[in-house]
Amino acid sequence: MQLPDSIQFIERDWLSANHIMFRDHVAGDDVASIVDTGYITRADHTLAKIDETLAAWDHIPLIEIINTHIHSDHIGCNLAVLRAHPGCRIAVPSEEAPYLVNWDAPQQMLSYADQQAERFPWDETIEAGQTLMLGGETWQCIATPGHDMGSLVLYAPRLRALISADALWENGSGFVVPQALDPKPLAAQRATFKRLAELDVAVVLPGHGPMFRDFSGALKRAGEKLEAFAADDLRIARNVVKGMFIYSMNWRGTLDRSELVNYVKRVGVHRDYNAMFFHLRDETYAQWLLNEAERTGKVRVDGDVIVYID
Ligand SMILES: [Zn+2]
């Protein structure tokens, strides 16, 4: 899948979102920018990937970070990148700015979901409908509320390329919260798929997973998954808490088995979802969560310790 030399897709994993880097000629200088920075505990890897690309581009300066949305796997290394590249500007979707002012609100799914990120300063906001020049291409900013209500994706009509963040992956999309908690995200995600389906897309650069070409197939698969969840709020709730626990285990690596009951009492998403959807005693919920996580093959119990399996 060939992108212009001025656009570099850097695939990461499920802990860190993918990066897209761009080379541009601005006011006589060659400069670089990056979409999304990855999860904080993998900052060394993010910085190394950036350096690799900048080196291949004759060590041009990195002057801008653009975030698609404010989840920890997309903004987690903003400050680390800023430290390594002083003067780099940070642009966030305008709808996300209130959450950055009111840092770590439950909607950001940060400490509420046992995730971490460093608070960062931002220089500008990006509006849906605006265009950005990146990698010599014009990109339209499109609002894709649902998984995150302030999320933007970027679409380059000439390249027929879509930077889809967590609004669309090859086999699904980012989670939406249960309708009992808030009915807007699921309806918004449905509308987002409709909006995306209007685009002429030849290549998708997703927030997670490899680049892919089967845009209409991906939309169909993601739409079907969403409707299956829409019919069953409890299934959404189970999926969210399981996903959040596995994500936390991914960055933690280990957790003492004896800590788990305290953990589910302490971490907001587990405490609140259990109270609202599962109505289990903390001990029972903790054991259920662990069983569910083990069944995915991502987590196992090794003596007194719960271990993430890489
Ligand atoms: Zn996300």
Image: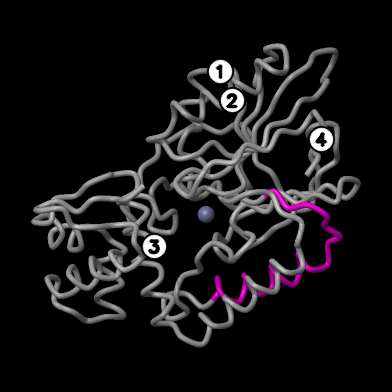
- Determine whether the residue tagged by mark 3 lies in a helix, strand or loop: helix
Q: Position of residue 46 (x, y in %)?
A: 51, 30
Question: Mark 1 vs ligand 1: CB under 8 Å?
Answer: no
- Say which amino acid is labelled 3: Gly
- Say which amino acid is labelled 2: Ile
Q: Which mark is residue 193?
A: none
Q: Quadrant of residue 223?
A: bottom right
Residue with the most extreme bottom position: 231
Q: Is residue 89 above or below residue 73?
A: above
Task: Tell which circle, 2 or 3, labels the residue nearer the N-terminal end.
Answer: 2
Residue bearing mark 1 = 85
Residue bearing mark 3 = 243
Q: Which mark is residue 133?
A: 4
**Residue 228 included in the magenta stretch of the image:** no
Question: Mark 4 vs ligand 1: CB under 8 Å?
Answer: no
> Is label 2 in contact with label 1 (beta carbons under 8 Å)?
yes
